[in-house]
Amino acid sequence: MSVFCFFVGSLNYPVKCMTLTSECQMILFKPQGSIDLRGGVALSEKMAEVVPQRHQLWVIDLAEVDFMDSSGLVSLVQGLKAARRIGCRLILCNVKAPVRLILELTQLDSVLEIFHTYEDILTTVDENSMLIAG
């Protein structure tokens, strides 16, 4: 199994190196700081670097994200469209209250799959529906 971890920076944090680990069947994005114009572009670029395979699980762990504006929402919607086009799932987890409020106000919380924690994803998602990434 493979997990591809992408650490994405924002205006205040530089983009960190890509970390590859062989442990799960998903692609994990871990943005940090704010997903504003710069952070949204960085996240979109990292998602575009993925060589998608049908039935992959794309997880965006927002544990380190304190702020998101419309640019961040655009990157999430673009990622969702790209994932669905290929036959993948895009899931958010660890969404903090300020970001959750933005998702609720825009009603994206009804479009995106959102889990409370990363562990909830691991216990809930049917492993048979995912292929090995990479």
Image (spheres, rainbow, N blue to C red):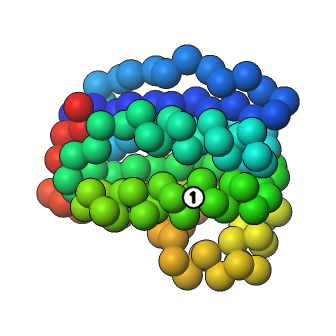
Picture quadrant where residue 96 is located = bottom right
Query: If the image is split into quadrants, where does the C terminus sit?
Result: top left
Q: Position of residue 97 (x, y in %)?
A: 78, 64
Picture quadrant where residue 49 is located = top left
Residue at numbered disc 1: 76
Q: Is 122 on the left-hand or right-hand side of 43? A: left
**Crowd tier of the residue under label 1, counting other residues whose Cα lies within 10 Å: few below 14, some 14–19, many 20 or above:** many
Q: Is 48 on the left-hand or right-hand side of 94? A: left
Q: Is 16 on the left-hand or right-hand side of 104? A: left
The amino acid on which the numbered mark 1 sits, given as a three-letter code, is: Leu
Residue 91 appears anywhere in the view: no
Query: If the image is split into quadrants, where does the N terminus sit?
Result: top left
Picture quadrant where residue 77 is located = bottom right
Q: Position of residue 8 (x, y in %)?
A: 62, 33
Image point (37%, 37%), residue name: 50
Residue 9 appears anywhere in the view: yes
Up the image or down, 1 lies above or below 63; here it is above
Q: Residue furthest top?
A: 17
Up the image or down, 47 lies above or below 54; here it is above
